[in-house]
Amino acid sequence: MRVIYLAFFILLVQVSLVVSADQEQCEPGFSEERYVFTVTRKLLERGRALGKVSFTSCAANNRALYQADDTRFRIYPDGKVMVKRQLALHDGSVSFVLNAWDAKGLRHSVPIFVWNEKEQEMSGSSDSLLSTHVLNTAQGIPAKGLTITLSKLDGNQTRWVQVSRSVTNEDGRCPGLLRGEPLTTGTFQLRFDTKDYWKQMQQDSFYPYVEVVFTITDSKQKYHVPLLLSPFSYSTYRGS
């Protein structure tokens, strides 16, 4: 009888060790560093499904508590992203931050981008005074799905103030950088999130991001700031 109890105890210890090892190997977090959902219409009605996010909470049921910093969106426990109330993509895109909590109560955050493919394609030929174009020179293709943040140095020259945050379309262009606002003089910065782009291309890269700083002295001129990009180099110039 003692032998049976001893064998049963050893089995329980082995099972406990396996469970503990599985828990230690589990790394909570989102499956992507950012999510981009593409729509083909300007007006998004209430209840419209945009896509799904994947989050590992390391809990037994692996369901998470989600919270978006934009109340126009709702995320269900299974990760489905829905439009909570009707909204219009006036500038062709909208972005927000999604938070989720793991089994230990730690918060994880990921940016979500929703952009109107048709509107951005149509606005790609507009006469915006500030534009950019990203080319993947390693493969000879436009860099689609690359996040770009436009910022301007404040009047005291002490900090950057974000103007817009957008995602490049299939042509590698990012219409609507100025969000319909007039171009002004000053010092600007275009930040290209190159690490995320190369990750989605399943390639290693050397530069996690590229920041291009430039000064506009004449707000009536056309400024085109393209980026020629490869995993281990980049170059830029002023175009027209």
Image: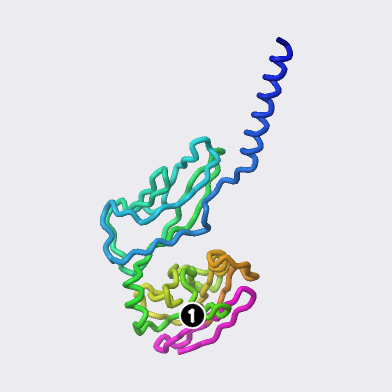
Left or right of residue 196: residue 47: left
> At 38% from the left edge and 45% from the top edge, which residue is drawn?
76
Which corner quadrant of the image does residue 6 belong to? Answer: top right
Where does residue 36 sit, x and y in percent of width and height? 43, 62
- Vertical side of 60 occupied by 50: above or below: below
Front residue of this view, candidates 239 and 121: 121
> At 30% from the left edge and 54% from the top edge, which residue is drawn?
48
Where does residue 31 sit, x and y in percent of width and height? 52, 53
Q: Which image quarter is the C terminus in?
A: bottom left
Q: Is residue 72 visible?
A: no
Q: Secondary structure at mark 1?
A: strand
Describe the colour scheme in one phrase: rainbow
Is 223 within the magenta? yes
> At 39% from the left edge and 88% from the top edge, which residue is drawn?
220
Q: Which residue bears the numbered disc 1? A: 186
Where does residue 16 sit, x and y in percent of width and height? 65, 29
Q: Is residue 64 visible?
A: yes
Q: Which residues, given as a range, are shown in magenta?
A: 215-240
Which corner quadrant of the image does residue 45 belong to? Answer: bottom left
Residue reaching furthest to the top:
1
Picture mark count: 1
Where does residue 116 sit, x and y in percent of width and height? 34, 67
Q: Which image quarter is the N terminus in?
A: top right
- Vertical side of 142 occupied by 193: above or below: above
Front residue of this view, candidates 126 and 197: 197
